Image: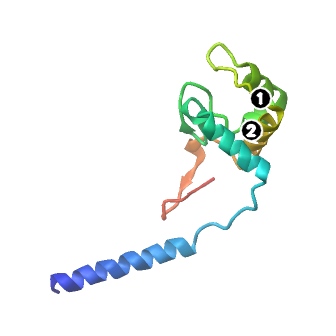
Amino acid sequence: MNKGKIIWLMVILFLSYTAFLYASLPSDSGIISTSVYSGKQIWQKNNCGSCHQVYGLGGYLGPDLTNVYSTKGETVIRSLVQYGTSVMPSFKLDEKDLNDLVMYLKSVDASGKSDPRSFKINYDGSISQ
C-alpha cells in the first residue's frame, strides 16, 4: 500500500469513529431551569471552583461540594456563603443570587455522587457510575 492510500484509510477511520461517538452521546437528562443556570453563572463569576471541587474537579483549598446539599443542608450553605469562615470569604449575595446558587448546588447534588474512585471509564472515554 502506498502512503496516500494509508492516509485516506486513516482519515476515513477517524471520521467513522468520530461519527460513531457523536451518534452514541448520552441523551439530555432534561431542561436546566433558569435558576440553576443562573446559579452556575454565579459559581463561575465568583470563581468558586478555584477553591472548591464539583465531581472531583476544581481547587483543593475547600471541600468538594458535589453532595454538600444532601450532607449539610440549605441553611448551612446559605450561612457559609453569606458570612464565610476563617478561610472562606463572605460573599454578600442578594437573595435571588443566593437562591440561584443554592439551586445549582442542589441540582449538582441530585445528579450523582462525587467520589471519582467509584466512576467507571467506558471504552469511548465517557464516565458512568
Mark 2 or mark 1, which has the lower sequence index? 1
**Residue kind at label 1, given as amino acid type:** Ile
Where residue 14 sits, quadrant-wise, is bottom left
- How far apart marks 2 and 1 lie (CA) works out to 9 Å
Write down the residue under mark 2: 101
* Mark 1, other Cα within 10 Å: few <14 / some 14–19 / many ≥20: some
Q: Residue at x 58, y 49 (%)?
A: 119
In front of the other: label 2 or label 1? Answer: 2
Residue extending furthest toward the top = 86
User: Viewer-proximal residue, 126 or 102?
Assistant: 102
Residue at screen point 75% across, 30% down? 93
* Residue placed under numbered mark 1 in the picture: 77
Q: Nearer the viewer, residue 30 or 90?
A: 90
Q: Is residue 45 above or below residue 84?
A: below
Residue 33 at x, y percent in the picture: 78, 54
- Residue 100: which disc? none
On the image, the x and y values in percent for residue 117 come to 56, 42
Identified at 82% across, 38% down, the residue is 96
Query: Residue 129, image x and y in percent?
Result: 63, 53
State the SS at label 1.
helix
Foreground pick, 92 / 125: 92
Q: Position of residue 123 (x, y in %)?
A: 48, 63
Residue density around tag 2, few if under 14, some if 14–19, many if 20 or more, within 10 Å: many
- Is 62 left, or right, of 106 in this rendering? left
Residue most toward the left? Answer: 2
CB-based contact (under 8 Å), mark 2 and mark 1: yes
* Residue under the image location 29 percent in, 83 percent down: 9
40 in relation to 91, above or below: below
Q: Amino acid at mark 2?
A: Leu
Q: Assign a secondary structure to mark 2.
A: helix
